[in-house]
Image: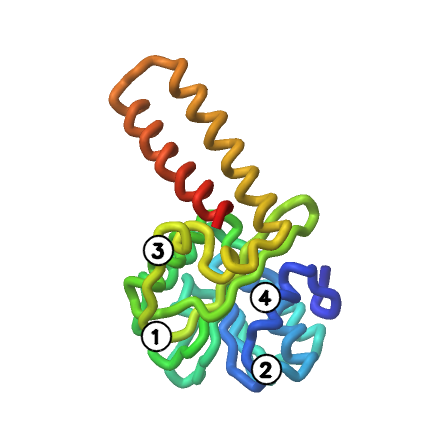
Amino acid sequence: MNAKNLSERLRLVASFAEQGTVLADIGSDHAYLPCWLIQKGQISRAIAGEVVKGPFESAKRNVAKEGLTDKIIVRLANGLQAILPEDGVENVSIAGMGGSLIATILENDLERLSGVNRIIVQPNIHAKAIRDWAVSHSWKIVNEAILKEDHKIYEILVLERGEESYNPEELLMGPILLKECSPVFQEKWQGELNEIERVIQVLTHSAQSEEAKAKRQQLSATKELIERGLKS
């Protein structure tokens, strides 16, 4: 993968960036995503934020190599601290992290989102943490996607400002993904169901501590949610 040949996962993330927008790509790694979007003419400018020095230096080299230093600013910063008011950022993308970490990044610097109208996230795990964050901060889910690449399943969530409520199944599995119920979606949640059932069996036959009982109850509740979602 490089700035001219994105993975299928990142191409799908890129497809949700608004035409002509100013994008902040947080945790940009090698800055492939903003470089690709600029070269396609989909966005006007970008901020590539990276907290780790090695990827930050790599991002700077890639932006220079692509001749995009006038269009992409690469910043060494923690999360949304890469965004400054004068940047005029309208879209934010965060891909390739855990959902809980993404929610924490959004939570830690809420004021940096003041001019942002769209957030595009691709959590590797725990997408529910992002849906929970969205509901509690007046963001709604306007689009979702799911794909399988290199034997891994990824979800993408697109948030915009607005009030929306979701039932427990929708928060866990995704309101739009639930309606579409694609084969990849079914594969993901059947796999989750199988793993939960395996762990419940282990806990049932292990020492009956209060902690084990509580864990079993929690998993059983999640199992019921998934089963209801798949049936609906």
Q: Are marks 1 and 4 in contact (CB under 8 Å)?
A: no
Check disc 1: other Cα within 10 Å, few if <14, some if 14-19, many if 20+: few
CA separation in Å, label 1 and label 3: 17 Å
Disc 2 residue type (three-letter)? Ile
Between 198 and 65, which is closer to the camera in this rendering? Answer: 198
Does 163 appear above or below 184? below
Between label 1 and label 3, give the one nearer the viewer.
3
Disc 3 residue type (three-letter)? Asn
Q: Residue furthest left?
A: 210
Between label 4 and label 3, give the one nearer the viewer.
3
According to the image, label 2 marks what residue?
43
According to the image, label 4 marks what residue?
13
Q: Could you say where residue 230 lies in the image, as x and y percent from the top left?
A: 50, 46
Q: Could you say where residue 6 lies in the image, as x and y percent from the top left?
A: 70, 64
Pick whichever of labels 4 and 3 is earlier in the sequence.
Answer: 4
Q: Are marks 4 and 3 in contact (CB under 8 Å)?
A: no
Q: Could you say where residue 44 lies in the image, as x and y percent from the top left?
A: 58, 85
Q: Are marks 1 and 3 in contact (CB under 8 Å)?
A: no
Disc 4 residue type (three-letter)? Val
Question: Callout 3: helix, strand or loop?
Answer: loop
State the residue at coordinates (46%, 56%).
174
Disc 1 residue type (three-letter)? Gly
Left or right: 228 in relation to 156: left
Between label 2 and label 3, give the one nearer the viewer.
3
CA separation in Å, label 4 and label 2: 13 Å
Q: Could you say where residue 136 lies in the image, as x and y percent from the top left?
A: 28, 62
Between label 4 and label 2, give the one nearer the viewer.
4
Q: Which mark is residue 176?
A: none
According to the image, label 1 marks what residue?
162
Q: Which mark is residue 167?
A: 3
